Image (tube, coloured by chain):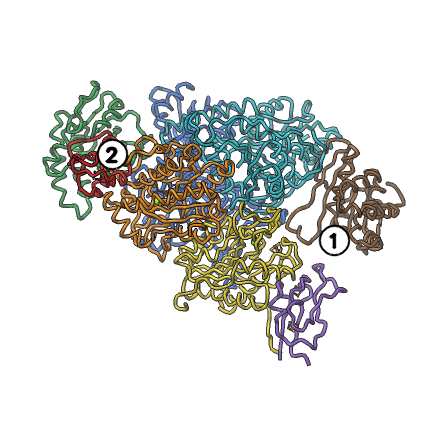
Chain colours: A red, B purple, C orange, D yellow, E cyan, F blue, G green, H brown
Amino acid sequence: MAKGKVVINEDRCKGCELCTTVCPHKILALDPKKINKLGYHPVTLTDPEECIGCALCARMCPDCVIEVYRE
Amino acid sequence: MAKGKVVINEDRCKGCELCTTVCPHKILALDPKKINKLGYHPVTLTDPEECIGCALCARMCPDCVIEVYRE
Amino acid sequence: MKPVFTRPRSLADVSTHYCPGCTHGIVHRLIAEAIDELDIAERTIGVAPVGCAVLAYNYFNVDFQEAAHGRAPAVATGIKRALPDRVVFTYQGDGDLASIGTAEIVHAANRGEAITVIYVNNAIYGMTGGQMAPTTLAGQKTTTSPFGRDVEVCGYPIRMAELLATLVAPRYIARVAVNSPAHIQQAKRAIKRAFEVQVNDHGFALVEVLSTCPTNWGLPPKKALAWLEENMIPYYPLGEFKVPKEAE
Amino acid sequence: MKPVFTRPRSLADVSTHYCPGCTHGIVHRLIAEAIDELDIAERTIGVAPVGCAVLAYNYFNVDFQEAAHGRAPAVATGIKRALPDRVVFTYQGDGDLASIGTAEIVHAANRGEAITVIYVNNAIYGMTGGQMAPTTLAGQKTTTSPFGRDVEVCGYPIRMAELLATLVAPRYIARVAVNSPAHIQQAKRAIKRAFEVQVNDHGFALVEVLSTCPTNWGLPPKKALAWLEENMIPYYPLGEFKVPKEAE
Amino acid sequence: MSEKLLMKGNEALGEAAVRAGCRLYFAYPITPQSELPEYLSRRMPEVGGVFLQAESEVAAINMVYGASGAGARVMTSSSSPGISLKQEGLSYIAGAELPCVVVNMARGGPGLGSIQPSQSDYLQATKGGGHGDYRLIVLAPASVQEVVDLTILAFDLADKYRNPVMIMGDGLLGQMMEPVTFPDEVKKELPPKPWATTGWTKDRPKNIITSLELQPERLEEHNRHLQAKYAQIVREEIRWDEYLTGDAEVVVVAYGTVARIARSAVDAAREKGIKAGLFRPITLWPYPYDALGRLADAAKNFLTVEMNCGQMVEDVRLAVDGRRPVYFYGRSGGMVPTPEEVLAEIEKLA
Amino acid sequence: MSEKLLMKGNEALGEAAVRAGCRLYFAYPITPQSELPEYLSRRMPEVGGVFLQAESEVAAINMVYGASGAGARVMTSSSSPGISLKQEGLSYIAGAELPCVVVNMARGGPGLGSIQPSQSDYLQATKGGGHGDYRLIVLAPASVQEVVDLTILAFDLADKYRNPVMIMGDGLLGQMMEPVTFPDEVKKELPPKPWATTGWTKDRPKNIITSLELQPERLEEHNRHLQAKYAQIVREEIRWDEYLTGDAEVVVVAYGTVARIARSAVDAAREKGIKAGLFRPITLWPYPYDALGRLADAAKNFLTVEMNCGQMVEDVRLAVDGRRPVYFYGRSGGMVPTPEEVLAEIEKLA
Amino acid sequence: MQQEFIFAGFGGQGVLLMGQLIAYAALYEGKKVSWIPSYGPEMRGGTANCTVVVSDHEIGSPVVTRPSCVVAMNLPSLDKFEDRVKPGGVLVINSSMINREPRRTDVTVIKVPATATATELGNQRVANMVALGAVVEATRVVSVEGLLDTLRKKLPAHHQDLLPLNQKAVELGRSFVSQVV
Amino acid sequence: MQQEFIFAGFGGQGVLLMGQLIAYAALYEGKKVSWIPSYGPEMRGGTANCTVVVSDHEIGSPVVTRPSCVVAMNLPSLDKFEDRVKPGGVLVINSSMINREPRRTDVTVIKVPATATATELGNQRVANMVALGAVVEATRVVSVEGLLDTLRKKLPAHHQDLLPLNQKAVELGRSFVSQVV
Ligand SMILES: Cc1ncc(C[n+]2csc(CCOP(=O)(O)OP(=O)(O)O)c2C)c(N)n1
Ligand SMILES: Cc1ncc(C[n+]2csc(CCOP(=O)(O)OP(=O)(O)O)c2C)c(N)n1
Ligand code: SF4
Ligand code: SF4
Ligand code: SF4
Ligand code: SF4
Ligand code: SF4
Ligand code: SF4
Ligand SMILES: [Mg+2]
Ligand SMILES: [Mg+2]
């Protein structure tokens, strides 16, 4: 089971990809199929099982889109 | 004979006594009897023979009252 | 599961007007975290600049004043002198603090005004569309330095942290960056410390934060982080330039 | 007999409005001597401040502009940019340069504006009747610090030479005093050098001159010289803070 | 009321501010108002207030912004060039609706000018000045006692309307000594300011002080609100004084110290049998257009006397609205008109 | 004349300045005029001129002072808050009689306001602003071509009268593109300036640029000289435009972009058979009082339309001097009146 | 004769340029023109629009409340400007990006699948040219030659190779117009 | 009744204080008063003067062109203000410092060797008190008791020992006046 859990507030995401660059497991990516209220492709977790809950993504996000939980 | 010669433009003197403090021979003093156009007691040479022409007085004077000549 | 990272309470739960990837947002969050951790939200008053952060007052759950361009330190002085037991901070850009507001920051610092200054240096005038700032790097192209900043004509980028550190009164002066998680952690410590200095020592504290402006640098947000690392940090060294005496 | 000391040609042959024993007069003379020795009178343009030296334009035989309070460096910038081959200097007091004009001097220096700045620090606002200056010493009584300058309330006296020396562009920055013949000789060398830097290197140069204000210090002129020596020099150390590269 | 004291206008103003409950004062020295910061540098510490010499007039007015936004009674003062530097800040203060008192002890202009008294900042104070549609309440005392009374009023009006109030004096008024009395009681009960940024105690919505409104619709709305407030001030706060205007054929219009001089001239004219009177605006904004206009029925003509090249005369013309000729006599650059000169002008018109 | 180009008002203004021989430009960025510094940052180096971004508006106006005093054609520009910061400098420049051009692409106020177009700095430009009795020549173009023509004129007037000239536009005019032509020739022959501080070559008396005159007698003398100059400008430089005023019963008075809008409304009114006309001041100072006043004989009433809460309307009242009613319609805060709105106002008065 | 246009869309759709091209083409044909952008806080990222007036005589107001033609390149633009079209005017909509029907019945609606057409042409960025073709065809504000001429003049030297593509886009745009208004 | 005074002299002669004392004394006697200094560039070092108006009714202009009394403590002051005295007024001159005769014949001239008298009293600084004594005696603007009372009130606590000296000076000053105007 995944060590970490990430909650993404999709409507706030601006698709800047700063989180994707810092995720050690590279499991964050923009979702090309979705467009949120702000008009951006929001970020999504490609492989939730791999998340270690390090919160680097959350700390890097300029828009406080991500919350992180861990065991 | 004096080594130095000092020319005092009395009308410009403001009687501040800065020159008197720096003269190595202490031969400058305000003339209590004179009052110049500006209303001050102007400086005067008390003992012209003692002047060595060092020009310290002139360099100290804020009002360029003194000119100094030497052999 | 336990929360590892949640939105700080002092950060208003709204979307900001900042461009995608603009690190102003990170700086906002770090300030909100410091306010939360020190539990001072109810006695904190913020001062917003004129610059992209002009609407900062909408983004914090604390009372705020919006200052004229460059005058935030004077406004903060007015607030602090009126209410000495409140915590007052300014949030200012590099145009705001290092250009038009030079006199105000120098003198607030020199007076040792007990305020916290968060100075966001993104080497450009963001809000007005990318004109040269006093901090724009040598050779950097902007809309008013279209051929690259010519240091012979307009001088060298100004290092405010170093300049202000020559003054006697300031208690804490540091420069940090927010272009990587590690730098962000450092930045967080510095910002918290800058508030502590005000709360505990009643002293002036300033943190210069190197920040990105992807829009006006003409770079995608990810590249902007790298550009900051490669170009800004070498010229604007990170570090603490002044720390409270007891901690030296 | 040969002349050892005569009035410099560039100094107008008139009586000044300065108080008896005010060392503004000495600084004027040293500037005139430098202009004479470099033979630049016909291409020199001076900029007078607002302060006791506001009428400086009457005292030099060169073209002059009178600037708004604190703005002499901006005015000088305008002149120099219009006429790059002329020699432009400002003459400014400590209220003018270190208080209201902080932004203008910092940025003229930071741009490396090729001007010479003579900055007369007498630790007080002379012209307006003796109010506190940013340079007023700790504990010094003035009409607006009647109980002595309280550094907790209004900060520490500001050392502009050191502050400006943190900038990259300035070529020459020095502090001198005019309270004794020996210091006056040093001051003379520094002032001349500050003009040479402009003429030869096209660089920014500033000389801070510690000066007396017997009237507002409430001291006879002679005692004012001693007060300067005993109180100002320990806080404002004399010396060269920045010298042209080749000469380092 | 306390004992009568002889005080300079500048100092009396400082004391009046203290009595009015002003506890913060930020300013930068300038002649001819420096006695005011000098006085308050001694006085403020006595009452636990703050005297802070700002690094500039620009800083001072922005400190006022901050302190006023934080709910304090606060004042700044300067003279003409320094007041010009405060214009951006004044516009912000008016836009953000912050109460404060700003003193201009005006001197001869333009530019560095002289340090002698002048009234040549009238239009700046009443019309132009900073950018945007805003108004200062402008009070023009003519004696040191009135300096005191109007200073106290100024703080009250500022708070009542959340608007900056300017006290418009001149070097003469600032330097002049006359007897004054002060109210014994220091103001203690100041009006509540629930809008102030005093720290958010959660029993109220978050307070924000700003003059920014990026949506023009909303900025227009805000401007409408300001205009409504100004209209209320016009209805309720106009003040003026009349002297022998009842049967006056020549109405002299003057304010501040010049009104004193004009009054002497009016007396002299009356002695010569000329029906002269004096109309003295006390509020320069709102201007007493109606009160002045009413005199146009009886008067033959109007003589505006100012210590400038003709500024208030435009308001006199607006008040008289073409019904009678309006003349102007002025001295400028720091020159003060004499009663004799004014009398001579009156005689020409009689 | 060169080929027609479509250009933004801000850029056209920059190019016109270059063609007028302006070689120094000092300014600080602000919306909505930043295209002007941006344009000149490219253009000035091409012609060997100086573009320098100043550290502030205060610095910029004082750089202008220095460069103008040194004999150069020089310009600065800003928008409302930045113009407020220049007021002290403007007063100095006017006092020292230095020619220069100052551009205000005004935006909604007061305070930080909005960045949308506005005319709410009218009174600041024409009456108040800085301290002391001085006047700016104020030119108000209504199209991009007129921006060009009046900019060139501005430099000539500045030099002719040794007086600062303000070009008063608004955000709309700065952002708008319209066809423009420029004079082919760059001005080469600039008027001699024997008074400039160019370095003292001993074939003339030493030159001093100052606005200080400590003796009030002499400052008054200087003010008299300035007033005489202003009187000459009033005699010689008033400019305005009239459209269908010959038989107009409703005279709409408007300037700048608003005059364009008003013109459309006048056309619409004529289509409905209403005798409407448009009076458009081109010089806001000196104001065309007489020309406007002459229309009072035929007109039934006057409608002033402004992008503010009512500023020029005072000048219209002064011009009409009580002979006809003067009405006002305005939008503020960055809102632009529409022809339809203006037409509705005209219809009320017809 | 006077025609007024509002071109509106996303920031990246080149709506300001559409307006400028029309303005230039009309200028070259001897008309009076004015162009104004909406500028403001929403500038960044959000929607953009500009107003163009083309007239035979001196232009009064460059600000237009009721334009004779609105070009809506996306849905927010249609929402914002649909009601403003003068009765009897023209409403051009980019049907690739707008999935709802216009409500107005008193104007001529021209649906142009501009984005789709451009994508087919291999370059989404010429969607504006497709729409422009339709505008010119429907309003005759300028001649097609005039528009193409203008394109030629205004394309920077290093982009002249894009001319045929743009030309194609304009032509396709015209083809969606069945009726000249 | 209204009287206007100009007190003029060197900076150090205490002329501003003379005016203030008269103003205070008059105030205590229930009169209306105003006092204005000349301030200006020449303030420093040079001459100083102040204008005092004492009146039974509201004071109009505090600025006075033709004072009823001028007190000239030195020659430049006499030169400057002699012509200004109202015909029939009083001109008090410090004859110790002024060696010329006044030109005016239409005013009452009172010569007071103020400096010399003060020097004799052992303190040159009370020359102003000598002159004040003469002024009060000649103009009766306030009573002598009023003046002395005021002196008592206004001398700071640590200078109260100077009271007898000042009193003496005033008395001597009065003795130089032969005629009450
Ligand atoms: C007096 C004044 N001058 C200029 C401006 C225009 N202006 C607004 S923000 C700004 C600069 C913003 O740059 P910076 O402070 O670096 O903040 P950023 O947007 O980069 O965060 C300027 C020049 C203004 N609003 N007021
Ligand atoms: C804008 C403005 N503010 C204030 C003043 C008043 N003022 C004149 S000189 C001066 C200070 C002078 O002090 P300093 O610069 O130290 O010169 P000093 O007289 O001591 O040589 C001040 C505050 C002014 N003229 N203009
Ligand atoms: S918490 Fe860590 S591992 Fe999980 S998504 Fe975020 S960065 Fe990746
Ligand atoms: S960093 Fe934040 S805003 Fe950017 S893509 Fe990731 S979640 Fe979205
Ligand atoms: S030159 Fe030297 S010795 Fe002669 S008077 Fe001057 S200081 Fe004295
Ligand atoms: S230093 Fe100069 S002014 Fe002073 S006493 Fe000596 S000669 Fe006179
Ligand atoms: S313009 Fe630059 S600084 Fe401003 S919000 Fe956008 S990215 Fe951030
Ligand atoms: S006041 Fe001071 S600085 Fe000014 S002239 Fe007098 S002594 Fe010199
Ligand atoms: Mg920035
Ligand atoms: Mg000083």
Query: Mark 2 = which residue?
Result: A69
The quarter holding residue G100 reads: top left
- Determine if residue E93 is in view: yes
Q: Amino acid at mark 2?
A: Tyr
Can you tell me which quadrant of the image ligand 9 is in? top left
Q: Amino acid at mark 1?
A: Pro
Host chain of mark 2: A
Residue at image x 47%, y 54%? Answer: D73
Tag 2: Cα neighbours inside 10 Å, few (<14), some, or many (≥20)? some
Estimate the spatial distance between the alpha carbons at disc 2 and disc 1, rounded to whole Å.
90 Å
Residue at image x 47%, y 30%? Answer: E196
Disc assigned to residue D181? none
Vertical position of residue E225 compared to residue E57: above or below: above
A31 displayed left or right of E37 = left
C140 displayed left or right of D108 = left
Q: As rendered, which of A55 and D150 lies closer to the eye?
A: A55
C112 displayed left or right of H58 = left
> Residue furthest toward the front?
A71
Vertical position of residue F271 compared to residue E343: above or below: above
* Closer to the eye: label 2 or 1: 2
Element at badge 1?
A: helix
Q: Are marks 2 and 1 on the same chain?
A: no
Quadrant of the image containing the C terminus of chain D: bottom left
Query: Mark 1 = which residue?
Result: H76
Q: Position of residue E227 (x, y in %)?
A: 47, 26
Host chain of mark 1: H
> Residue furthest toward the left?
G120
Q: Position of residue F66 (x, y in %)?
A: 47, 53
Element at badge 2?
A: strand
Vertical position of residue C238 compared to residue E294: above or below: below
